[in-house]
Image (spheres, rainbow, N blue to C red):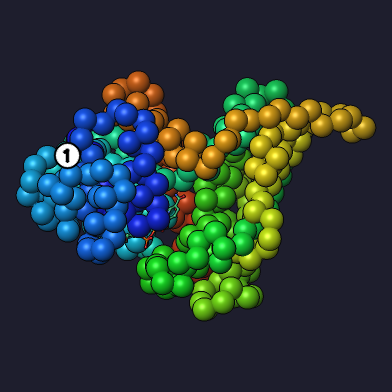
Amino acid sequence: MKLLLIGTGSIGERHLRCFQQLERCDAIAFCETHAPRRAEIAGRYGIPTNLAFPDLESALADGHYDAAVIATPAPTHIPIATRLAALGTHLLIEKPLSLTIDGIEALVEVVKEKNLTVAVGYVHRAHPAVEAMKEALDSGRFGRVLQIRTASGQAFATLRPAYRDVYFAKPELGGGAINDMITHFYNVGDWLAGPIRRVMTDADHQTLEGVTVEDTVHSLVRQGADGGVMGSYALNLYQHPNEVLITVVCEGGTLQAEYAKKRWSWMTEASGAWHHEAVEMPEVDVMYRRQNGAFLDAIDGKGSVLCTLEEAIRTLKVNLASHLSVKEGTWQIVNA
Ligand SMILES: NC(=O)c1ccc[n+]([C@@H]2O[C@H](COP(=O)([O-])OP(=O)(O)OC[C@H]3O[C@@H](n4cnc5c(N)ncnc54)[C@H](O)[C@@H]3O)[C@@H](O)[C@H]2O)c1
């Protein structure tokens, strides 16, 4: 397994570290256009200079890669993915996949033709509390899903201090809370409660210093096979507690994932008590190792990726509809 990472900014570095920790690659190469960052990453992770390339061209000139991780800003994901797919390279593409649907069909075609494994980095599917909820919902023991609510927030300026200087500040590079953050929850919502069919979003910039992109998002949705599930997704990028709360209300009970408390819970009786189950989350990298391990397993024919290209395309369409809803102030049908 020879792996190529493209882009080693904040998430590319995490992927590099997590793939190294998995110890399942014979060689890990990377390309990074920013020279000081390239030297820093090569030094920190002991990557020999002959595997640290200044750009994709020189990396590809050096040979074939079995798999690649695309961790550059969003507008480059599809062109890079399509090029690598044509070379027969399995792909882990970072979210949000793209900012338009241009080139998506061609990518899907070539992936099919070359029979490739493609995963998209919607990593919340790898959170053990979310995974446990998914399993419980799929078991049928809680019955039909009626409502889903996600509420999340974090002190972005503290947790991602470089936000002003990277893609996040620029909508045309995938910045703003819709493409950068709430998209993760649209994707988890799709996984837990079915595809989002229509969306109404209110979003604005409230306070995050040094940027004008939206830092607060509220979306109402209809989702599920027949659009019968009602959903709401709320997020901000400035509150102090780093918090993710995902609640799914079913005919036979309520399920909840609470990241800060490292647990998922359920309740099945009106005057009953919550049943809590702890999950192992010693560090955030756990999710990335699970996601990336599943990608390698899928390449080996031993399992499936956590988020498929098809599922990520659905989420991309929700992102696009959500932006349009903000602009027009109306409900938008998600073009499935
Ligand atoms: N799944 C997650 O948890 C998660 C978290 C953060 C970011 N992301 C996504 O990952 C992507 C990158 O985010 P980031 O925070 O790492 O951004 P970043 O700006 O920190 O890093 C991007 C890096 O790519 C390099 N680069 C740009 N174009 C390149 C090219 N053509 N070839 C090689 N290197 C190139 C830049 O120099 C930079 O170092 C975005 O799409 C973002 O939405 C996902």
In the rendered image, is residue 175 in sight? no
Q: Quadrant of ligand 1?
A: bottom left
Please report the residue visible at 47 percent of the width from the left and 51 percent of the height from the top.
315
Secondary structure state at the residue bearing disc 1: loop
- Between residue 223 and residue 315, name the one nearer to us: 315
How many numbered callouts? Answer: 1
User: Seen from this angle, which residue lies furthest right?
Assistant: 271
In the rendered image, is residue 203 in sight? yes
Q: Amino acid at mark 1?
A: Tyr
Q: Position of residue 296 (x, y in %)?
A: 32, 30
Image check: 169 left or right of 238?
left
Q: Position of residue 196 (x, y in %)?
A: 56, 49
- Between residue 252 and residue 95, name the one nearer to us: 95
Q: Position of residue 160 (x, y in %)?
A: 50, 61
User: Is residue 26 placed above or below 50 in the rendered structure?
Assistant: above
User: Is residue 242 placed above or below 165 in the rendered structure?
Assistant: above
Image check: 276 left or right of 203?
right
Please report the residue visible at 30 percent of the width from the left and 28 percent of the height from the top.
24
Q: Position of residue 272 (x, y in %)?
A: 89, 29
Reading the image, the residue beneath label 1 is 65
Q: Quadrant of the N terminus?
A: top left
Q: Residue 9, located in which quarter of the rendered image? A: bottom left
Please report the residue visible at 14 percent of the width from the left and 43 percent of the height from the top.
87
Q: Residue 332, located in which quarter of the rendered image? A: bottom right
- Between residue 159 and residue 245, name the one nearer to us: 159
Please report the residue visible at 17 percent of the width from the left and 39 percent of the height from the top.
65
Image check: 242 left or right of 19?
right
- Between residue 15 and residue 84, name the one nearer to us: 15
Kindly tell me whether mark 1's CB lies below 8 Å from ligand 1. no
